[in-house]
Image: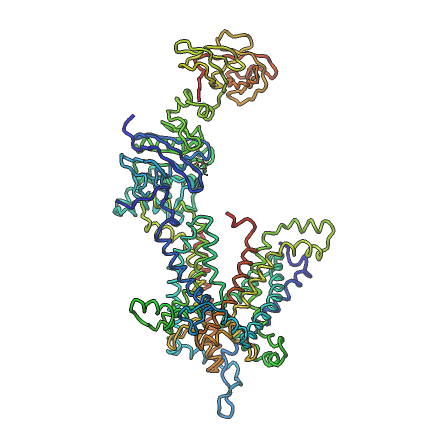
Amino acid sequence: MAAQLKPGQGPLDYGSRTWLKVLFAVIFFVLYAPIITLVAFSFNTDKRGVVWRGFTLDNYTKAWNNASLIEALTNSLVIAVIATVIATVLGALTALLMWRFRFPFKGAYEGFMALPIVIPEICMGVALLLFFVNSGMMELFVHLPWPLNLGNIIFAHVTFCFPFVAVVVRSRLVGFNRQLEEASKDLGASEWQTFWSIIVPFMKPGLIAGALLAFTLSLDDFVITFFTSGPETVTFPVKVYSLVRRGVSPEINAASTVLIVITVVATVLAMKLQAPPKADKG
Amino acid sequence: MSEAIVSIRNVTKAFPGGVTAVDNVSLDIAQNEFFALLGPSGCGKTTLLRMISGLETPTAGGILIGGEDMAYTPPNKRPTNMVFQSYAVFPHMTVEQNVGYGLKVTGVASDEIKRRVGEALEMVKLTALATRKPDQMSGGQRQRVALARALVKRPKVLLLDEPLSALDAKLRDDMRMELTRLQETVGITFIIVTHDQDEALSMASRIAVMDKGAVQQVATPAELYEQPKNRFVADFIGKVNLIEARVHRQIGRKIDCELKGVGRMELNSDNLVGAQVSVAVRPEKLKIATSEPTSAVRVQGKVRDVAYYGDTSHVVIEAGDGLDLSVNVQNDTRLGGAGVERGQQVWVYWAPEDSIVLTE
Amino acid sequence: MENWKQNPRVFWTLGIPPSLWLLAFFIIPLGFLFVMSFSDKAMVDGQVSITGYDYLTGITNYIRAFDSLYLGIMWKSVWISALATALCLLTAYPIAFGICFAQDKWKPLLLLLVVLPFWINLLIRTYALIAVFRTQGYVNKILGVVGLGPYEMLYNNFAVIFGLVYVYMPFMVLPLYATIERLDKSYLEASLDLGGSQFQTFLRVTVPLTMPGIISGIILVFIPCLGSFLTPDLLGGANALMIGNVIERQFKAANDWPFGSALSFLLMYATFGALALRYLFTLRSKGVDV
Ligand SMILES: Nc1ncnc2c1ncn2[C@@H]1O[C@H](COP(=O)(O)OP(=O)(O)OP(=O)(O)O)[C@@H](O)[C@H]1O
Ligand SMILES: [Mg+2]
């Protein structure tokens, strides 16, 4: 006799099956346990970070007083902000171009714009390294005062961020009702006025979501920065990398926790803004 | 009635959202019947059918199939097969593979599969398309695949959920006859779900009329039409004139009652003294006369509307007391039409035995 | 959409800045890399120069890449990535499936839970794994309670594979979720109704009908795994190197840029190969995925 169903349970009600619930619990546990441990132990008094000895904020103060860590974090934030602004503008231009015009080789152009998204990070990192060194840009920027010496990294970050922004903004533009634009022009508004008063406000959620995405991508990037940064221009992930290579310390936990909070907040915001109205209210 | 092949006992299905889709339903469906579940949208027909197939399980009650309680048996262990409303013909398999699927997964030998698939395809006249993929076929052809795929399993019961709703009108008529023919040939019990009363009346040997999750009446098509049990059934099946009436007294097996807008008359019915009842009369049972008829039941009124339908005309007559009567008139002479015109004063009459007294 | 000729001024205003940017900071750098991959270090006074190069000397770097040492590393990169991808598929499928069949009110939360780690810095997640798996880490502590270990769980192929699965699983869940969610559930019901067991239904109906999502997921995970640098660098030992680590080494410690450039191009070709495969599969499955 085959296994019977429970009253009210259909054969496709996998949601109510125990094995699936257990599997979910296990996978989510494996996914989150390391991160939660990391966050929890940023509040631990134990130096070696293995046994829970009590709650403290010492690690945060220590991280805060660690000048090189703070400098790296500042660099990261400055880079992320500047790169986000430029990437958002370039991404919006690309999105508008693809949305508005038909032109020869559009498919090829689109593929070309997606290249920075698909090629392995390490290839892009070494290509930029080669370029900066051979074009003299590395030499040039290294000697400039802060924050200009972050120039190379910013160029690199903009390059891998703006195609993502373009994708996000374009998907927003798809929902635009062209008649609004026509109506505006019909009422005597110029191209430029129409753009600012009709199209930009419509794009705004897409722009914000794209900007937040660019911000997190930039803040998170390690590989490309690793190749394009000079010895004086260390970003937070690069700094953490060098610390991690030396071993585990509660200070890194504290610094990491701060970064996790920043990115999670940015992401959740981006998702909220990106979700089409009413769509996920189900 | 011969022995029941499907026996539904006090089945209730409440969905987690709080909707009670099927509410304490009991039904017996006999061997070889062509049974229809009929009702308005959302009345729970599909849910009931899916509980017979095992795709849903009841929250209370029992479902006996072939004498065995299978209410909680998974669908793959039941002797029932379903023709889905969307057909659900597997898009990644050819027609042959689709039809053979149910045999293959239950471990039937491959030469037998081949033979039975061949027979099934012949039965639905699809032999020529055996190697086609579903996306190269019309809706009607896909439906035949779905039928063959279910019939090839030789189920005890074949379940069909609105099988004709996705077809165009012409194909639907052909398919109706085809289904009746198939049912007679294969001798399998068919249970069909439909919200189209013509479909149910023309195909089924028995019909269960459902409303709000409950069965209102189970009867043959003619019984449903001529002896509806309550106002819902009378109104749902065909057109009807419902007239409010008050019962004054009982005379043997007759009642003496007052029909609103018509007057006092005697009708066949059991003891209902003092009750508020409805009297139902079908429009084609009403007759129109220009001079006072002799019938015991007659009422005078003014023609408000005449709608011409070719073979018949539908006439609406305003009687007194806010009562409107619909009358179907056969257009039996070429130039005569309905024989009445708007605004004309006429008499409407009918035979007392054509009235149905409804208490619920 | 209007033709660009109708409004060339707007067209160029929109098109020029991003195109120039991409040209300057992407195409030209790749051009440098391409040229470098065919170059050699210059010889100055019989010594190998540190910074001078003889450009476009030939394909020696590519020939060297097919030397057994590097061929071995490439092969290892491929199988580690393949294994990690397969494990991702095995864990992600039930997750995606479960989310699709969960009650509607839980779906957004479950999806968020799956993608959230993906937004946390890769480095931090990898670091979190190190903290848990190191010799004095949690897993060993817990094993210690049962009287096992401690084991060295880091710095080997296992750690790299686990790390890759851990890091890239969300990439697999999303395309799978999208296709399973779109799959008409009446196909599964039809299969069950025709007598197929749950397992047969899964194998013969669900899997073939969600193949486009499976292929997308495989490509989406395989590509970053193949090019990964950080995970094998931090979790792998000396002998758990992948192609990304070799490239990094050529550009940093070994200072052999021409060879590193050639390896980078090989990695890019492999990536494009994988993308082309995916494109072919989508063409082929067009018929199914109506
Ligand atoms: N899975 C479900 N969860 C919650 N409520 C449901 C579910 N399926 C059906 N219902 C509800 O149960 C009631 C009956 O649905 P059912 O599909 O059986 O109606 P039906 O008679 O087949 O109607 P139709 O003619 O429109 O197909 C409806 O109110 C419907 O909203
Ligand atoms: Mg229905």
Give the quadrant of residue C225.
bottom left
Instruction: Classify C37 as above or below A281.
Output: below
Q: In terms of depth relative to the viewer, which is nearer, C47 or B12?
A: B12
Where ligand 2 lies, by image quadrant?
Answer: top left
Where residue B141 sits: x, y (%)? Answer: 41, 40
The answer to whether any part of residue C70 appears in the image is: yes
Please report the residue visible at 45 percent of the width from the left and 12 percent of the height from the top: B352
Q: In terms of depth relative to the viewer, which is nearer, C1 or C257?
A: C257
The answer to whether any part of residue B182 appears in the image is: no
Instruction: Classify C226 as above or below B244.
Output: below
Where residue A8 sits: x, y (%)? Answer: 37, 42
Q: Is residue C99 left or right of residue A166?
A: left
Q: In terms of depth relative to the viewer, which is nearer, C167 or C57?
A: C167
Q: Which image quadrant: the N terminus of chain B?
A: top left
Where residue B359 sits: x, y (%)? Answer: 44, 20
Instruction: Classify A115 as above or below B9.
Output: below
Q: Is residue B133 left or right of residue C257?
A: left
Q: Is residue C75 left or right of residue B108?
A: right
Where residue B162 sits: x, y (%)? Answer: 42, 36
